[in-house]
Image: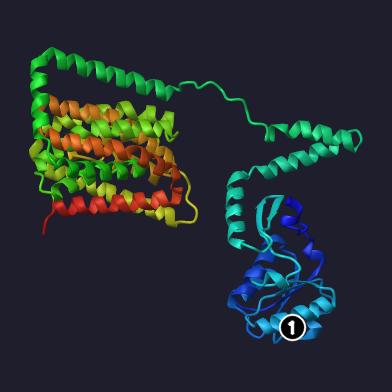
Amino acid sequence: MANTANPLFPVFLKLEELQTLVVGGGAVGLEKLSAILANSPKAQVRLVAPEIHVDIWALATKHPQVELVVREFQEDDLDGKDLVLIATDDHVLNRAIRDLAKSRKILTNVADTPQQCDFYLGSIVQKGSLKLGISTNGKSPTVAKRVKEVLNEAFPEEIDQVLGKMGKIREQLNGDFAEKVKQLNALTEGLVTPAPKKKQKYNVTSVLVMVFAAIALMVTGHLLFTYIPLQTIGNVALDVASQIDSDILIFIVAGFVAQLIDGALGMAYGVSATTFLLSFGVSPVAASASVHASEIFTSGVSGWMHLKFGNVNSKLFKNIVLPGVLGAILGAYLLFTFEEYLYIIKPIVAVYTLVLGILILRKVLRKKAKKKPVKKLGFLATAGGFLDAIGGGGWGPIVSSTLIAKGRNPMYTIGSVNLAEFFVSIASSATFVAFAGISHWQIILGLILGGSISAPIGAMLARKLPVKTMMIIVGIVVIIVSLRLIVMAFPF
């Protein structure tokens, strides 16, 4: 059954040693000629048509062996030809040319007419010297295209290096044909035999995360049970439960949207959540306090998901986490002490992030951009934690945007910065609570629930989105958020 389902015999032709004729100079003719030259750049081709697409002329200038003839098809165009590809929009003419070619025993392909074709142009997968042809027997070019996409992803670019090395090995093998095949099979067995699963080992980043989390939990628990009696905790829990009503759904949605944006792009949780809450009538003080408190939990879940999905660069994380924590503590303390100067700090941070957003978009639009490493990661993280606490948000826009603008991979940058944000949030929030207390439990709980739900989705999006797409989105979000902060700082 397998042999009769698709009876086509696959071959690879040396078109540079054959004479090929293309009839038709429109979009389809361009497609056929492009396919030929993409696979055989030195193919000998004559294209005949009364009108020829401008892109065909441009293509022919790059391939001087291609001959373009501006006139109607004539029977003597078939003289000396080995292959004919017919691509006009006149079905009667196509059939006539096909019959003439067949009478001369010339193999013919008629565009979009499988029953009149002697051969098909299948989808091609090429990685260096490796070339795979895909055919659906003319039934579904779309399926062939999708299979091509899958195979393109499956075969790495390095496969061409493997082929080159195997060719050299083959030349050095001794023995008869059977012995050479046996040796080559032994050498290439690793390409198809799955590697044995290794026992999972905890890397340095995972250990650091668990150690920091355990320390934070122990310190929090010690302070909680030392200074607050259990009866008081119970009364607070009952009070929180009594505050919960249907409005919590609004806060869950706010947390979901804000964390989805932050998890995928590595920034804008505070701004997104605060803007959402303010639009539903929550006071600025309640919104700011609630967002800071909830961010401990949402950033923790988001950071863990990034770690689980493999989005974290352990070296980058270790370089930014401690400086970020110190900056957050200092910023939260100074904000409580010099709260009246907040209106000056926010627009300065906004102008800085606006410039970063523009640099990110510029980097994407430029064809070639050199990667410039950030030498003072500790200083950047300290500034990010400090300004995040001072300005009510900014860890992601400052740290992530700067690193991405300098050429860092967006996926690993966002994952590492998100994981570090958990510890930065603990530091700033603990400092705020120590000096100013905390309230608005329903808002906090709603933000935590919504953010925890969307955190895995955001981490997965950060891994799935193409690098260029992520950089464009990050740049646009940074610019919009920065402009909004500038406008709010200088109302007209």
| Left or right for 432, reference 201 | left
Secondary structure beneath dot 1 equals helix
User: Count of labels shown?
Assistant: 1
| Left or right for 250, reference 376 | left
Closer to us: 248 or 433? 248
Q: Position of residue 257 (x, y in %)?
A: 27, 45
Q: Residue at x 43, y 44 (%)?
A: 407
Q: Residues within 10 Å of mark 1 (few under 14, many from 20)?
A: few
Q: Residue at x 20, y 16 (%)?
A: 221
Residue 386 visible from this viewpoint: no
- Residue at the extreme front of the image, as rendered: 1
Query: Looking at the image, is 109 positioned above or below residue 198?
Result: below
Q: Residue at x 73, y 70 (%)?
A: 117
Q: Residue at x 17, y 55 (%)?
A: 487
**Looking at the rendering, which quadrant does residue 189 occupy?**
top right
Q: Position of residue 276 (x, y in %)?
A: 19, 48
Name the amino acid type tagged 1: Ala
Query: Looking at the image, is 298 positioned above or below residue 223?
Result: below
Query: Looking at the image, is 127 positioned above or below residue 116?
Result: above
Residue holding disc 1:
96
Q: Position of residue 5 (x, y in %)?
A: 72, 56
Q: Position of residue 259 (x, y in %)?
A: 28, 41
Residue 146 visible from this viewpoint: yes
Location of the C terminus (image quadrant): bottom left
Q: How is the image coloured?
A: rainbow
**Looking at the rendering, which quadrant does residue 40 occupy?**
bottom right
